[in-house]
Image (cartoon, helix red, strand yellow):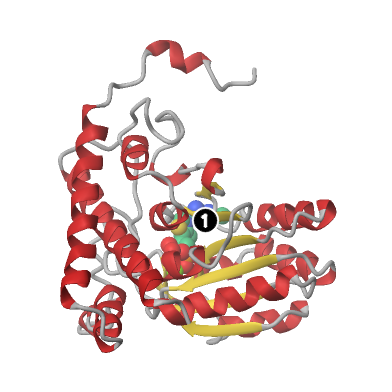
Amino acid sequence: MASDERLLSMLRRMIEIRGFEDEVQRLFTKNLVRGSTHLCNGQEACAVGACFALREGDSMLCTYRGHGAVLAMGAPLDGTFAEILGRESGLCRGKGGSMHLTDVGVGAYGSFAIVGAHLPIATGLAFAAKHTGSGAVSLCFFGDGSTNIGAFHEALNLAGIWKLPVLFFCENNLYGEYSPIATTTPVERLASRADSYGMPGVRVDGNDVVAVHTAVSEAAARARAGEGPTLIEAMTYRHRGHSRTDPGKYRPAGELAEWLAKDPITRLEALLAENGVAPEAIAQARADADKAVEAALERALAAPEPGLALIEEDVYA
Ligand SMILES: Cc1ncc(C[n+]2csc(CCOP(=O)(O)OP(=O)(O)O)c2C)c(N)n1
Ligand SMILES: [Mg+2]
């Protein structure tokens, strides 16, 4: 299990992600963000538990609900805010926005808005790692809905037959847009889909950062040992609606409250207290995270809008 010190760093990162998402929602209501956005409040243990199990040189790909994953990899808070605000100091010089956060320097190889589109790319990165013998793994986040997309099955099949070092990480938050999973998916246990592709399928509590970290560490060790991919299904829940304008009214009464009681941040704080970590250290992690988010937002808001000349850069035709 991760040391208390490591767990405190995970706590701090999870609080930063929560604070980041709350600020993004506020920026939206102030009309400072163009396009849509999909927040990951409630799913922070998936992002942090999984990304903290990687090492330098590994790659990570995620979806449009990927702010948390990109930040968990170590992308700077200010550059990420700036990207969502469309500023030149953003991760992609303000050209990508909320759904396309990318920071190759920290191993974040892209956020993808087309459901399932990035799974074959993760398999490709894993193929490259195997081919060059780099020892790297690729971690691929996707939602429960993505497991009904053709690309999911093709990517797992190829990774399975070639025993590629890829970790398929499904965040099962029980909904795809406004549809409860039972209305779209004929199997209850998505991890069982691994059976068809000759890889282990494991289901974990996605609101338990230690369980996520352990599962991904084990899968990464298997992958690095040449034993191939793993499908991990993490059971979790998004506290907010699908995207910015969705109040999530289709959810049955009491469901949100039930999941709020299993908040991954509160649970990690409780675990640290149980381990005997001083309350001051936990409070300090929270204070540091809040301060970092606030300062980063200030810097991003002060950054200039991109000049017109930028429109001709980063284009190929
Ligand atoms: C190929 C494709 N089909 C449909 C959509 C529209 N769409 C956007 S998000 C989404 C739901 C995906 O649900 P899930 O994979 O569970 O991810 P979650 O949003 O719950 O994180 C859909 C259908 C899309 N972006 N891409
Ligand atoms: Mg979902």
Residue at 64% x, 82% y: name it. Answer: 201
Give above or below for 76 relative to 168: above
Q: How many marks?
A: 1
Q: Where is residue 139 in the image (x, y as percent from the top left)?
A: 60, 62
Residue 7 appearing in the image:
yes
Q: Disc 1, ligand 1: is the CB inside 8 Å?
A: no
Q: Quadrant of residue 168?
A: bottom right
Residue at 54% x, 84% y: name it. Answer: 203
Q: What element carries label 1?
A: strand
Residue at 71% x, 52% y: name it. Answer: 125
Residue 184 vs residue 34, the one in the foreground = 34
Q: In which quarter of the image is residue 165?
A: bottom right
Q: In which quarter of the image is residue 288?
A: bottom left
Crowd rating for badge 1 (residues with CA inside 10 Å; few <14, some 14–19, many 20+): many
State left or right for residue 209 relative to residue 148: left
Residue 145 vs residue 60, the one in the foreground = 60
Residue 172 vs residue 180, the one in the foreground = 172
Residue at 22% x, 83% y: name it. Answer: 261
Residue 183 appearing in the image:
no
Give above or below for 22 relative to 302: below
Image quadrant in which the C terminus is located: top right
Tell me the residue that label 1 is attached to.
62
Furthest-top residue in this view: 309
Give above or below for 142 relative to 266: above
Q: Position of residue 235 (x, y in %)?
A: 44, 80
What amino acid is found at the position of numbered circle 1 in the picture? Answer: Cys
Q: Position of residue 27 (x, y in %)?
A: 20, 43
Q: Where is residue 137 in the image (x, y as percent from the top left)?
A: 67, 61
